[in-house]
Image (cartoon, coloured by chain):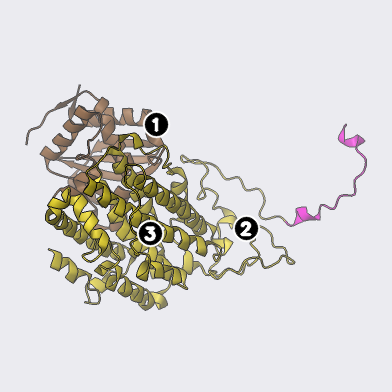
Chain colours: A brown, B yellow
Amino acid sequence: MAAFPSVEWFNAVRERYNSDETLHTGGGGPCEAKAALCIGDHIYLLEFEGFECAEIRQIDRNDIDHVDFCLDMPLYEWVDMVNNIQQHGEADLHHTLSTMDLELEEGLARAPGDDQYKMDLFYRYNQNFQDFFNASAGVPTTITVMD
Amino acid sequence: MRVSDAPHLDLDTSWMERMGEWGTAAQPGKRGLTLEDIRIGPYGELPEESDNMSGRPRGAAERPEAYRIGGYTVRSKKEIWLDNATFLYEEALQRQWSSATDIPWETIAPLADDIEEAECALCTFFNEVEFVAGDVPARWVANISPDFFEARNVLLAQVQDEARHMDVFRKRALANGGGLTRVTGATSGFIGGIDLSRDFTEMSSRMHVSGEGAVLTMFRMGELVGQNPAEKRMYRLCAQDEARHVAFGIMHLRYLHATAPERHEEIEAYLDEAENLPLAGGTNPAGPQAETSEALAILLGGGKQHYDEGFRILLAIRKRQLKEYMQRVVSAGFGERFENGRSPVPGRIAELS
């Protein structure tokens, strides 16, 4: 059982995502993007290369300038999303990344330096990121944080 | 039969002396053998000005007697180029999807009449818009010198994308007890006028940056109001394609900004036009005056009875649409207009705050 959020948890999700070939076609094909996931006090780098999620590691706030975009929302929203995916097998209609991005007051996605070209990568590769988080439904998870 | 036994053949093989560069051996990388991988040697060299009127593939040897089969009007690199053309083309090919099998149509269920009508109105609007978005680049492809085939190929892929968008919205309108609504007429005026552009960059700034940038926000809004997984995925996949088209426009403007300072004022004029017409409302379905904005407000609010709440959300998203447009123009290199008072967009964003 992996704890959310942790590198171990993300790597477990990564293995499931990379090994499921049905997720790499039909609009979820190759993807080239680096995203920072800001989850509470922790920041994780999620890097996609071609057909796979190539790397996940923890990074410092100073490293954010080198990513394409950040997904940043309050911790309880992250927990709510992960719980929702665990319960439904995938994000329900109210918990997809794009929906949360538009429903949250401050949005979910932003690009360092407000570079919209980089920000648009979140829209260009949205299915990959959605599939990645949906793959967490198959990862036995414990939530280790409270907000 | 051994070669030594073969009868003597008097073959004219002089054509072998008129090859392109020989001995080329491109190697596939992690993403397969991409167009970027074969941009090597003289095959990767782009002319600043192309005099190739015969359709000769770039790098092939010339044939002096060849007919001038191409009436190419786009023959200058700075008129058409962008630095990531090969990447966008490969991405477009490898991220294709099928409206028939990649949308979970089985998840659609009957909706309240007002919601179904609003969704069908939106689908009708997108049908109209996607016709323009496919027709226009299709018309330009044959005008572009084959020496710049990478950019040409991105446009060809866009035509395929737009055909799929047109068909997926038509399918949605006809899949759940509704149908198409009255044509919105949105493709007259500015949107239809994109097709009147006489210059490629004029067309691209109108279509890719202003028009498709606005539609990208609409597709994302579509996902927000999606009533079932089919609609969510339909809008999400369309938004992915649209973001790629917008990327073409931004990167082309960025290239032109860097290489053609003599055209800056002209580009500013295209942006003036966009900011004073579609982005101000009118044919912008997320704007305050368009018929389709009512459909959106009904969907965002969750029904006619929550129209006011829906319209409040619509205005918030419209603000975001304008902000994203502004940031795209900044990213393309033309951001000064938002600081020197030329653009009305900052003022409109302030009004919406």
- The structure residue drawn at horizontal position 36% and vertical position 39%, both measured from the top left corner, is B103
- On the same chain, marks 3 and 2? The answer is yes
* Subunit under mark 2: B
Residue B227, placed above or below residue A112:
above
Q: Nearer the viewer, mark 3 or mark 2?
A: 3
Residue A53, placed above or below residue B73:
above
Q: Is residue B256 visible?
A: no
Label 1 Cα crowd, 10 Å radius (few <14 / some 14-19 / many 20+): few
Circle 2 sits on which residue? B57
Circle 3 sits on which residue? B129
Label 2 Cα crowd, 10 Å radius (few <14 / some 14-19 / many 20+): some
Q: Is residue B304 visible?
A: yes
The quadrant holding residue A14 is: top left
* Subunit under mark 3: B
Q: Position of residue A90 (x, y in %)?
A: 25, 32
Q: Dot 1 lies on which element? A: helix
Distance between the alpha carbons at the discs numbered 3 and 2: 34 Å
The quadrant holding residue B19 is: bottom right
Circle 1 sits on which residue? A22
Q: What amino acid does circle 1 point to?
A: Thr
- The structure residue drawn at horizontal position 27% and vertical position 67%, both measured from the top left corner, is B279
Q: Nearer the viewer, residue B245 or B228?
A: B228
- On the same chain, marks 1 and 3? The answer is no
Q: Nearer the viewer, residue B209 or A34?
A: B209
> Which portion, as a residue range, is magenta?
B1-18
Q: What amino acid does circle 2 point to?
A: Pro
